[in-house]
Image: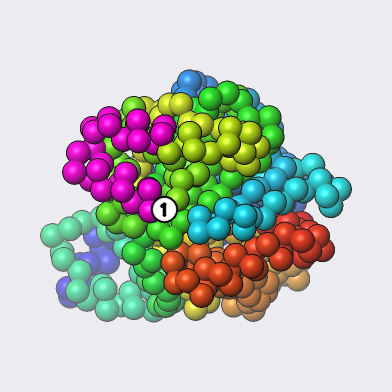
Amino acid sequence: MNFIRTLATRTAAKFQDVVIIGGGPAGLTLMSALKTSPKLKHLQCTLIEGQSLDSVREFEVNPPENYTNRIVSLTPKSIEFMQHRIGNWEYAHQDRVREYDGIIAYDSQDASARIEFDITSIGKDTLATMCEVINIQSSLLRRLEELSAQPTSGIEILDSTKVTEIINPLEETRDLENHDLNQPNVAIGNPNLDWPIVKLSNGESIQTRLLIGADGYNSPVRKYAHIESRGWQYNRFGVVACIKLQYEDFRSVGWQRFLTTGPLAILPLTEDNATIVWSSTPELSNILLKVNEAIFPHLVTAAMVLEEVDLNYIYSVLEEDPNDFSVLKDIEWRLSKFDSRTLEESYPLPVLELVPNTRAKFPLKMSHADTYIAPRVALVGDAAHTIHPLAGQGLNMGQSDVAALVDALEQGASRGMDLGSTLVLEEYNANAWPANHAMLGVCDKLHKIFSTDFYPLVLARGAGMKGLNMFGSVKDLMMKLVSGR
């Protein structure tokens, strides 16, 4: 009797072909790719994002004067995918995009140990392109708006909507028996289908043929699918900020210095703007966030040039008092010991200003899911993997995930197969997982090699960098890998 009353209080769930959880670049890219594909555009698709996307929509029509601090390095392969497979790149604000053709990386323990990458040596003109994450999201939303104008587009975007629960329909009978009869209008799907049921904060439920987790490191979709994710925290934080240089650097290169606390990268933006990613210890990251805004630019300049023993002294002063301006004279005096021509030719330009409200930090970690798929489930982006930012490959790996998943779904559709079946999804896992695993391993090993002051290892890595810089063929291979070519 109770079972019959429970059924009477329930409403029917909506059925969809694909539900994507997560409105970041990976989720929006996947939705755009599905609806652009001639073989998949007929699918009924819903994207669910817990936060509001209003700021992303506003960026498209009224971007702020200054850069936002979430900025990524896009490979030519990622941009080609957005240009030719999706068609969103034309909607990005191109005046906020900066290409660069080289990277100069050097060791804090040995100034002569440096590698210079120049993509023009292999006949290409762009190594990577700097772009704000919100600029990418905005262009994808604009593309989806364009696609939504078509009759029966099958596009639904639910932002400011949280996933409250994901149910395995095979367990739905047990859920019915435990249902609180005082909560009416709970939606139920078809218990005869093995399609996941997604319950939403707006009271709706969706039963879907294929559930995609683009929902970040703490992915509810991954947990629903009982997929293990393995890795570790680095006990390091990435500090990001937007800065203004002394003037526009026409060398069109990114700079990276390997400090024992972690690498510090300065990457070019338009005009005199640049962005930094400073991997640091918990203690140093706190100093970098608290130090006076007028001191911070000089601290970045110093960290790209001075010996670490000098930097540690400066950090100790600022730890006691983040507003101690006496360090500016100390930094100036120490920099004056360097030949002015050496500073101009071998190091990045001095930093003049910190763009207000752009400093932030995030924990650094490495994680990798044991698999990207389960029955009727696939993972993309940070839900599948997180990587150290020293190679700038995080978002690009997510874009590659999307491309590989769409290829697998197109192949399944051509064969008339069920797109949620593991027979279809296994092709995606086979193509995406090994390449990502290799990239994760490389970045993890680089982090461990360069974040040490153990003298024998310092000597070995210095010799390795000098030797590597002499072998053009090896550098060319590395540039092809970094640029996705």
Q: Is residue 416 toward the left or the right of residue 371 in the image?
A: right
Magenta segment includes 325 = yes
**Image coordinates for residue 354, horizontal then vertical, percent:** 41, 29
Element assignment for label 1: helix
- Does 456 sit above or below residue 147? below
Q: Amino acid at mark 1?
A: Glu
Q: Is residue 433 toward the left or the right of residue 291 in the image?
A: right
Type of colouring? rainbow
Q: Is residue 463 toward the left or the right of residue 283 in the image?
A: right
- Does 27 sit above or below residue 100? below
- Does 398 sit above or below residue 435? above
- Tell me which residue sits at (68%, 62%) in the image: 466
Frontmost residue, 146 versus 453:
453
Magenta segment includes 278 = no
Residue 294 found in image quarter: top left
Q: Residue furthest right?
A: 123
Q: Quadrant of the C terminus?
A: bottom right
Badge 1: few (under 14), some or many (20 or more) residues near its Cα, within 10 Å?
some
Q: Which residues are magenta?
A: 309-333
- Residue designated by label 1: 308
Frontmost residue, 405 versus 62:
62
**Image coordinates for residue 352, horizontal then vertical, percent:** 46, 26
Frontmost residue, 68 versus 476:
476
**Image coordinates for residue 20, horizontal then vertical, percent:** 49, 56
